Image: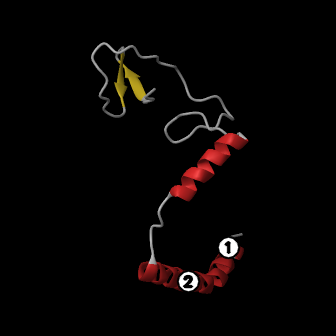
Amino acid sequence: MNRVTGTFRNGKVALDQPVDWPEGTHVVCEYGAQPEGLDVCSDGSPWEDTPEAMQRWVAWFDSLEPVFTGQELERFESELRSARDEQKLLLPKWQERIDNLH
């Protein structure tokens, strides 16, 4: 099943993205937003929080290749540490500004 979203205007639904469905494909339209409290994934499918679903997600995540390796990873971690150190120096100034808001 392919889930897409769209907007109803002038008696027709304009889809938010192109689809490659054959002409005459039957579709189902639902009116309104998701019920409050219903978690959904970014593709609109229901969020599963069962132990089996979590195991599948962990297995998928563990199968991913690292983004950075070797010297790239060392450089990234060094730049990240440097940025965090710079942010720590800013914290007292921000706290002072927050304290002076009232």
Residue 49 in view here: no
User: Which residue is denoted by mark 2 in the rendering?
Assistant: 81
The answer to whether residue 96 is above or below residue 8 is below
Quadrant housing the C terminus: bottom right
Q: Quadrant of residue 48?
A: top right
| 26 relative position to 56: left or right | left
Disc 1 is placed on an element classified as helix
> Residue 82, how many percent across, how many down?
53, 86
Q: Which residue is located at x 31 percent, y 23 percent?
A: 21
Disc 2 is placed on an element classified as helix
Give the mark nearer the N terminus: 2 vs 1: 2
Which is more toward the observer, 22 or 36?
22
- Going by the numbered disc 1, the residue's amino acid type is Ile
Q: Crowdedness of circle 1 by 10 Å Cα count: few (<14), some, many (20+)?
A: few
The answer to whether residue 101 is above or below residue 48 is below
- In the drawing, what numbered circle is on residue 98? 1
Residue 47 in view here: yes
The CA distance from mark 2 to mark 1 is 25 Å
- In the drawing, what numbered circle is on residue 88? none
> Residue 8, how many percent across, how many down?
40, 21
Which is more toward the observer, 28 or 96?
28
Q: Which residue is located at x 46 percent, y 26 percent?
A: 1
- Going by the numbered disc 2, the residue's amino acid type is Arg
Chosen colour scheme = secondary structure
> Residue 43, how many percent across, how many down?
49, 38
The total number of labels drawn is 2
Q: Which residue is located at x 59 percent, y 29 percent?
A: 34
Q: Quadrant of residue 33?
A: top right
Disc 2 or disc 1, which is closer to the eye?
2
